[in-house]
Image (spheres, coloured by chain):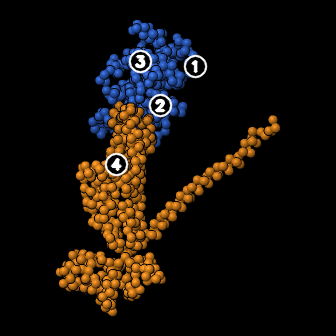
Amino acid sequence: MELAIHTDVSANARVNTQGHTSKPHKVTAEGVNVFYGNKQALNQVNLDIPSNMVTALIGPSGCGKSTFLRCLNRMNDVVDGCRVEGEINLDGENIYARGVDVVHLRARVGMVFQKPNPFPKSIYDNVAYGPRIHGLAKSRTDMDEIVMTSLEKAGLLDEVRDRLDAPGTGLSGGQQQRLCIARAIAVEPEVILMDEPCSALDPIATAKIEELIDELKENYTIIMVTHSMQQAARVSQKTAFFHLGELVEQGDTMDIFTKPIDERTKAYVTGRIG
Amino acid sequence: MSDTLTHSERIEAGLAKRYRAEKRFRLYGIGAIAVAMAFLAIMLAAIGIRGIGAFQQTEVALTVVFDETHIKDNNWQAIVKNSMYKKFPDVTSRQDKRLLTHLMSSGAGFYLQNLYRADPSLAGETRTVWLTASDDVDMLMKGAIDRASLQSERRVSDKEIVWIDSLIADGALELKFNTHFFTGGDSREPELAGIFGAFMGSIFSLAVCFLLSFPLGVMTAIYLEEFAPKNKWTDVIEVNINNLAAVPSIVFGLLGLAVFLNFFMLPRSAPLVGGMVLALMTLPTIIIASRAALRAVPPSIREAAWGMGASSVQTVLHHVLPLAMPGMLTGTIIGMAQALGESAPLLMIGMVAFIVDIPGSFTDPATALPVQIFLWADSPERAFTERTAAAIIVLLVFLVTMNLIAVVLRKKFERRW
């Protein structure tokens, strides 16, 4: 039985390893199954995510890529009837093991959502929220510094320096999304998850976010879901292609887009299915 | 096909009809609002016209001698009588004298007593004092008793009218602002009856009701909406809460009588118990409104907080609750307004008693504004009619004030996302 599953796994997750060698893996998923009630959303996903790189999860709608992303910081825990099987390891430790604290996990694995969702508070308080609840700042000046550095890293500081007390919801869509990124990096996570971070933004705001993601990968491991294959090609070093709840193919972005092994990947990246 | 119209022509032909239908629909709406406003205006006007009289009270200026023998006997009414006899020296027969003293309220003596208590040096002095006239005189002054009608059909005789007219001619009988109505407690004499006792009773009851139902209701809503597992038990609880909102209020009164009074032996007629019963009644309203408010908070805010590593309690307290607060306050104010206007449950726990004293604490016997209205509406004296209407005005002003406070609070808490 065990053997059968293993052969099955190797059959459905093809690893496109032509070319480059990979860095050490920050996150590894082994045999991940996700169920919403009786419906299986992910089927035996095995995926290795290298540190300090951008990994793009691509695939048609409903393929399970967002579901997989949300498993990485256990956001699915709060969904009624959602069940996760298998192992997801962060630095070699299973985050679904007994005794793992989700609050601690989410401080290590930050998240940026599809629709910018700043808190209805001031820009300052938005960024300061994470450090505040986790007790990261020892003093007021400490906090000021964290907020400023985070806004700086998110490329937002110059635009909001003189109105830190203004509500975060009053910013433009692209600025709001960068505020959300600043909020996420304020707690110095190790991994940042991004769920289609640019889908609600115009091309100029998108370009800024992409540029930012490229800079952030120096310090963080970034995993992003995207619907735009151009975006995946532009910003990611690794790509994983999901289809109907299965991880079809993973590998270097260049290889996935230029020399896909699987027929379905080829069909998707050339625009025939999706 | 006999139909040779093009699409565009067919659409054009139908347009007029469509616009007519739209216009009609709008007219129905305006009509409905107009009817509703008209009824509201009629109601307010009727109450206002009837009640405005109670804010004035007929008073008589009398030259009062603070006779020391009467003070010693504590016979204050005798002082009032003597003043009247002095004012009308021509009245000599026993019967007429009695009639004459009936022009004054029985409260006039108490008023003099209070004056003396405040200033004992008045003993032996002579002062001109404005004293409350009887309710019959008051009604005559306000036109509720018709002078032109037959003597046998009115409560004020021709003789009395002559005396009253002579007092008016002297400038010794006037309608003055009725402060006593706003500062006094209930009385059997309409000219002495005030609303303040019932007002305080309502304030105390509502305070208890708010302190119990708001925290309980909000906590229940938060737990059910944010933390409770969705299973059979929570379904049962939810159905029961929704049903409780529709239970007739008198049933809550009976419950209060059986549990709070008979089992826990809490004091009868007390605002404490009244507030507890009203809280039972208000709770379902607050819970339902608060849950709706929580549900209306966009899930993206919760996700953002969870994603930052906030615990469930932090997510609720820092983000969800502040956003839901305006809605919760709206629900609370609706519940409190209901509680303010409720009389049936209060009848069951004895807050319908005739209470003259103004309650000073949560356990003093008291009544409430709607119950006071009910009591006065039930009283036979003509002068209670205007007092009933005036009490309704006070109740409505109280209600509007409460709503205004809620609106201000809501504006203060409101945040946009």
Q: Quadrant of residue B269?
A: bottom left
Residue nearer the viewer, B151 or A270 = B151
Could you say where residue A120 lies in the image, as x and y percent from the top left?
A: 42, 41
Q: Residue at x 47, y 9 (%)?
A: A11
Circle 2 crowding by C-alpha within 10 Å: few under 14, some 14–19, many from 20: some
Q: CA distance from mark 1 to mark 4?
A: 60 Å
Same chain for labels 4 and 2? Say yes or no: no
Could you say where residue A272 lies in the image, as x and y percent from the top left?
A: 59, 18
Q: Residue at x 32, y 78 (%)?
A: B105
Of the two numbered discs 2 and 3 on the same chain, state the one appearing first in sequence. 3
Of the two numbered discs 1 and 3 on the same chain, state the one appearing first in sequence. 3
Circle 1 crowding by C-alpha within 10 Å: few under 14, some 14–19, many from 20: few
Which residue occupies the extreme front position in the image?
Answer: B152
Subunit ID for the residue under disc 3:
A
Q: Which residue is mark 4?
A: B280
Give residue A273's mark.
Answer: 1
Q: Amino acid at mark 4?
A: Leu
